[in-house]
Amino acid sequence: MDKKKSLIALSAVALGSVIYNYLKPVKSNVEVVRNFDIKRYLGNWYEIARLDFKHEKNLRNVSAEYQLNDNGTVKVINQGIDQNTGEVKQSIGKAKFVGSETEGALKVSFFGPFYSGYNIVQLNPNYEDALIFGDNLDYIWILSRTKELSEDRKKVYLDYATACGYDVSKLTWTDQGDILETTGQIPVE
């Protein structure tokens, strides 16, 4: 009988953990962009820099495309080329607003009901480049509509990230060079 009670208790804890992760709020500890316009944010972005993590390890020519779904969510298509194999890797997910649609606080999921923060904390007024933080100091991205970003814009983002506690010396600067040179594959635009 004790084994049965232990199994039930363990099952309840496991179920509780799944439910918590599914329902937990995803919010930023920093201020996000206000007066945000998702329609201006849609389209293609190039990754300029990131804090590297396993899903983007060894990727170059990384880009993200954002498309508005009929239900108000945002389709997210991330892709890059593995610099070791030349293989194109793609992840498709969805993003939702955490609160108001006029604030750059979203949550994104590539794995079922599990979401992570996607917080647009700095944004060029013309929606040409952006600084995005995750839920913690492990995730940061600098994005641009073009494959290059001016040193002045980089400095703005690096200074802000440093002031927020990020170790910008650990950033991976994404190689957006000519795809044909290294892989022989047709560029993905």
Image: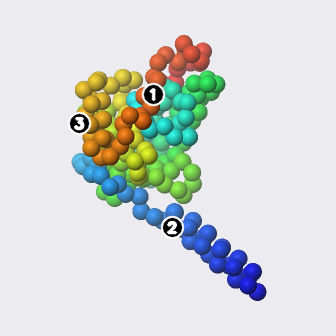
| Cβ atoms at labels 3 and 1 below 8 Å apart | no
Along the viewing direction, whichever of 60 and 40 lies nearer the viewer: 60
Circle nearer the N terminus (2, 3): 2
Amino acid type of the residue that numbered disc 2 sits on in the rendered structure: Tyr
Label 3 vs 1, first from the N-terminus: 3
Distance of mark 2 from mark 3, alpha carbons? Answer: 37 Å
- Return the residue nearer the eye: 161 or 99: 161
State the residue position of label 3.
Answer: 125
Q: Is residue 66 above or below residue 128?
A: below
- For label 2, the residue is 20
Task: Say which quarter of the image contains residue 50.
Answer: top left
Can you name the residue that lies furthest to the bottom here? 1
x and y percentages locating residue 63 in the rendered image: 46, 31
Cα distance, mark 3 to mark 1?
23 Å
Instruction: Describe the element under mark 2 as helix, strand or loop.
Output: helix
- Element type where label 3 sits in the image: loop
Q: Quadrant of the N terminus?
A: bottom right
Mark 1, residues whose alpha carbon is within 10 Å: few (<14), some, or many (≥20)? many
Q: Residue at x 29, y 36 (%)?
A: 157
Comparing labels 3 and 1, the label whose residue is closer to the camera: 1
SS at badge 1: loop
Residue at the (59%, 33%) spot, across then down: 89
Give residue 16's quadrant in the image.
Answer: bottom right
